[in-house]
Amino acid sequence: MNILVTGSNGQVGSEIRELSSEYEYKFFFTDRNSIDITCKDSIRDFCKINSINVIINCAAYTAVDKAEDEVELCTKVNVDGTRNIANICKELDIPMMYFSTDYVFDGQGETPWEPDCKDYKPLNVYGETKLAGELAVSNTLDKYFIVRIAWVFGVNGKNFIKTMLNVGKTHDEVRVVNDQI
């Protein structure tokens, strides 16, 4: 089985790369320099040349605060790029996994959302574009998985754990909001 992983230099993609050696599949790890997800032909050509059987889309614009000022770029990656991948998956009959976010919801409430909850209420551009990506996948494909994650952390990239370790080096006391379950 040949598996394409987009966004392989990001936190999720690099963790998949790290774990991939444990499996007998052939993985193709791409980033924005090797495959442009905003170009359908680029995706199609790569999939055909490499006989791709599954696509795991980790590519995303993830700068939540900057997205408010970079709406066009955020939309191009999170919506248009995801839609392109979904369309190619449909055309070539390839299952797709899409990584989304809890930002598709408003963060209100006191219980976790159910896996198939559709009570969407994104509060920012990032959440809106990730929701639009989810809908592009679910409205296009029959064979897909959408994985919503809240906290991403790992060896690579910026993340909460690294931030807290750095703050701990310079502050005697660290205060953190405790509102996630």
Image: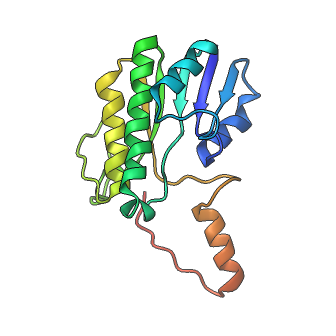
Residue drawn 41% across the image and 29% down it: 84
Residue drawn 49% across the image and 23% down it: 41
Q: Is residue 73 left or right of residue 20?
A: left
Question: In terms of depth relative to the viewer, which is nearer, 20 or 69?
Answer: 69
Asked whether residue 108 is in view, the answer is yes
Quadrant for residue 52, please give it: top right
Residue 22, compared with residue 2, is above or below; it is below
Residue 57 x/y as whole percent = 51, 33
Residue 43, compared with residue 158, is above or below; it is above
Q: Is residue 103 left or right of residue 123?
A: right
Quadrant for residue 158, please give it: bottom right
Q: Is residue 127 left or right of residue 178?
A: left
Q: Quadrant of the N terminus?
A: top right
Asked whether residue 115 is in view, the answer is no
Residue drawn 32% across the image and 23% down it: 140
Residue 170 x/y as whole percent = 69, 84
Q: Quadrant of the C terminus?
A: bottom left
Question: In terms of depth relative to the viewer, which is nearer, 49 or 54?
Answer: 49
Outermost residue, right direction?
Answer: 21
Residue 7, compared with residue 95, is above or below; it is below
Residue 131 x/y as whole percent = 33, 43
Residue 36 x/y as whole percent = 54, 35
Q: Is residue 106 left or right of residue 69?
A: left
Question: In terms of depth relative to the viewer, which is nearer, 18 or 34?
Answer: 34
Residue drawn 32% across the image and 53% down it: 111
User: Which of the colour schemes (rainbow, by chain, secondary structure, one colour) is used?
Assistant: rainbow
Q: How many marks?
A: 0
